[in-house]
Amino acid sequence: MLHAALDASGRVYLHSCYDASVNLIHVRSDDPEYRIIAQKFLNGWLHPDKPTPTIKRIFYVAYSTEEGLEHLGRFSDYCNRVGNVEMLFHGTRCECRIGETATSVTVCASETCNLCKIIKGSYRMERAKGQRMFGPGIYSTEVSSKADIYADNVGASQNKHVMIVNHVALGRSKMMYEASHDMQHAPPMYNSVTAATYPQGGKVNYHEAVVYREDAICANAIVVYS
């Protein structure tokens, strides 16, 4: 059984696995790709009040279902059109033990475990609800300690936290200096928005970027940490 995955640079590669149900591929700590992702994660931990975390494991997200492979194809097409692809972090709700061991590589069946829903297929715009600074979009950040705020671990080991590493096609990104809660899409001629930080004259402490379409973002790995 072949699974498709994105490496740290955004290239698609094929991974052979006997089990079609596998949704994660364990990345060994001596793998150069592990070091790239780990360094990005640790360098992005900027909140001075948060102790530096310990990385337990890193996994690639493996796409083998029809839904997942279709999303991977749409993402690749969109990247080729707009460019400016960044590796950014996203924290979300986790209700299960996926990634807790090197062999915990199959998503759970819960409809409210956002982590597994994303790993299984893709991000969904209909889940992007609520009062957001730049409207209902898909938010990600280069600051891992900021994404950690949203890495909500429910009903699983309290020593385990999971963060999604994504490739995000920002294209032409509009710098936003004020909140715009009613936004439904990027401004005309732009593909995404980026929040200006306070030093840049904006209203946030740390970087965040927003895309408004599912094919603009693709989970390529998860970091399990404590």
Image (tube, rainbow, N blue to C red):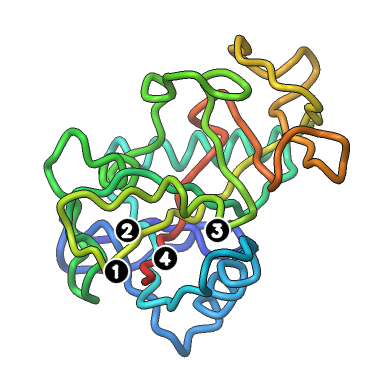
69 and 169: which is toward the camera: 169
Given this view, does label 3 or label 2 mark the residue nearer the observer? 3
CA gap between label 1 and label 4 equals 22 Å
Image spot of residue 111 (x, y percent): 17, 33
Q: What is the C-alpha distance between the residues marked 1 and 2?
A: 6 Å
Please rate how many residues cluster around mark 4, counting C-alpha atoms within 10 Å: few if below 14, some from 14 to 19, many from 20: many
Q: Residue at x 57, y 18 (%)?
A: 135
- Residue 145 x/y as whole percent: 55, 58
Query: Residue at point 87% right, 41% down?
Result: 200
Instruction: Say what secondary structure mark 1 lies in.
Output: strand
Residue 170, how many percent across, how many down? Answer: 69, 37
Whether the residues at callouts 1 and 2 have beta carbons within 8 Å, the answer is yes
- Kindly identify the amino acid type of the residue bearing the numbered disc 1: Ser
- Tag on residue 145? 3
Seen in the picture, residue 56 relative to 191 is either above or below; the reply is below
Residue receiving disc 4? 223
Query: Can you tell which of label 1 and label 4 is closer to the viewer?
Result: 4
